[in-house]
Structure formats: structure tokens, C-alpha cells
Image: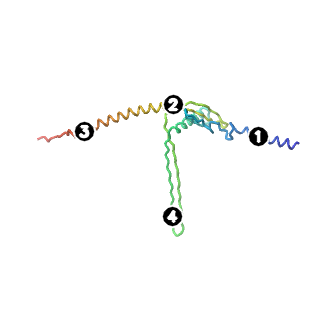
């Protein structure tokens, strides 16, 4: 009986240790919104993390990273460089091969995000912060419309400038200025 009780005590202790070691049902201690970010037809959601040694800096970093996550979802330019090099040299069976492989990839995003809102934030055991931010897709559409209107005005100005240059070319071809030598 003592062995059974001891065995049950060991099993219960182990279960308690493992259950206390996890957070929100996952063993990594990550918030649920990190593991499964929300999906919506109305919002872009961004997840960010910050751990800078001070709470205010960590929160600011987490929010910045979440905004960057949203911006990458809207538009990202991916630049990639791949280099693969091999060289074999030698004499009389004494050859050496030099191989080189390099893969560099860079994601670039440049988005104006006005109206991004914090949905939730969690401080994790190591002292860092996870944050979930949302951006209304309607705000993005409105911002794009404003940008398009400005671009349309610029295109019209370019069109008018090209018309003026065409008129100048026409005048120069059809009404040449002829100078005659002075006698």
C-alpha cells in the first residue's frame, strides 16, 4: 500500500510540475495569439515580441515588431542573392577542391500605417512582451485612395509637361530660326 501511495504521489508531483511549466496550453510558454494569430476579413493582425531589459523599451519593441508584421502582410519586396562557386585545381592527382555557397535574402517593406491598435499584450516568464496589434483594412483602402489621387495629379502634371515639350519640338521643326551672316 505504501508503494502504491508513493507511486501515486510521484506521478501527481510530476503532473503538477509539467502543468505549471506550460502556459496557455503549450509547452513553449507562448501566448495563444502567437501560436495561432487571428484571421479576419476586416483586419490585418500583427504579432511582435520585445525583450530589451526594461519594460517600456520591451513594450515599444514588441509594438514596433507587430507593426512591421502587419506591413509585411500588405506588401513586401524580397531581394535575394544566391552564389554557388566550385573550383578544382592541382597537378598529378594532387587536387584540391574549393567550394563556396552563399544565400542572402532580404525582405523590405515600406508602409504607412495609420490607426494600428493594440488588441492584447502578455508579459512572459523571461521578462519579454508579446503583443497583438490590428489594422483595419478599410483604413488601408482609404490610405491607398488618397495616395492614388496624389499620384493621378502628378501624372497629369507630367502629361501637361510632355505636351508642352511636344509643342516646342513642333515649333522648332516648322519655324526654324535662320540667321544670316552680317555683311
Q: Residues within 10 Å of mark 4 (few under 14, many from 20)?
A: few
Compared to residue 105, the image places residue 171 above or below, namely: above
Q: Which part of the image, by quadrant, shows the N terminus? A: top right
Q: Residues within 10 Å of mark 1 (few under 14, many from 20)?
A: few
| Tag 1 secondary structure | helix
Q: Residues within 10 Å of mark 3 (few under 14, many from 20)?
A: few
Q: CA distance from mark 4 to mark 1?
A: 62 Å
**Residue 105 location, x and y as percent?**
52, 47
Identify the residue position indicated by label 1 in the image: 15
Q: Residue furthest right?
A: 1
Circles 4 and 1, Cβ within 8 Å, touching? The answer is: no
Identify the residue position indicated by label 4 in the image: 89
Identify the residue position indicated by label 3 in the image: 170
**Residue 85 location, x and y as percent?**
50, 57
Identify the residue position indicated by label 2 in the image: 138
| Tag 2 secondary structure | helix
Q: CA distance from mark 3 to mark 1?
A: 89 Å
Amino acid at each position: 500500500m505504501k508503494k502504491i501511495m508513493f507511486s501515486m504521489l510521484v506521478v501527481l508531483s510530476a503532473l503538477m510540475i509539467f502543468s505549471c511549466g506550460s502556459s496557455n496550453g503549450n509547452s513553449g510558454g507562448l501566448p495563444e495569439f502567437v501560436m495561432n494569430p487571428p484571421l479576419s476579413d476586416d483586419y490585418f493582425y500583427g504579432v511582435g515580441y520585445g525583450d530589451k531589459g526594461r519594460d517600456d523599451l520591451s513594450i515599444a519593441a514588441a509594438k514596433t515588431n507587430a507593426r512591421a508584421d502587419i506591413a509585411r502582410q500588405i506588401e513586401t519586396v524580397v531581394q535575394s542573392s544566391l552564389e554557388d562557386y566550385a573550383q578544382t585545381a592541382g597537378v598529378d592527382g594532387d587536387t584540391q577542391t574549393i567550394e563556396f555557397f552563399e544565400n542572402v535574402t532580404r525582405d523590405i517593406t515600406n508602409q504607412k500605417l495609420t490607426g494600428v491598435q493594440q488588441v492584447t499584450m502578455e508579459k512572459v516568464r523571461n521578462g519579454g512582451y508579446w503583443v497583438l496589434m490590428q489594422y483595419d483594412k478599410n483604413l488601408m483602402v482609404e490610405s491607398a485612395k488618397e495616395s492614388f489621387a496624389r499620384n493621378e495629379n502628378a501624372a497629369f502634371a507630367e502629361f501637361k509637361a510632355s505636351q508642352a515639350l511636344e509643342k516646342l519640338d513642333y515649333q522648332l521643326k516648322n519655324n526654324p530660326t535662320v540667321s544670316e551672316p552680317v555683311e
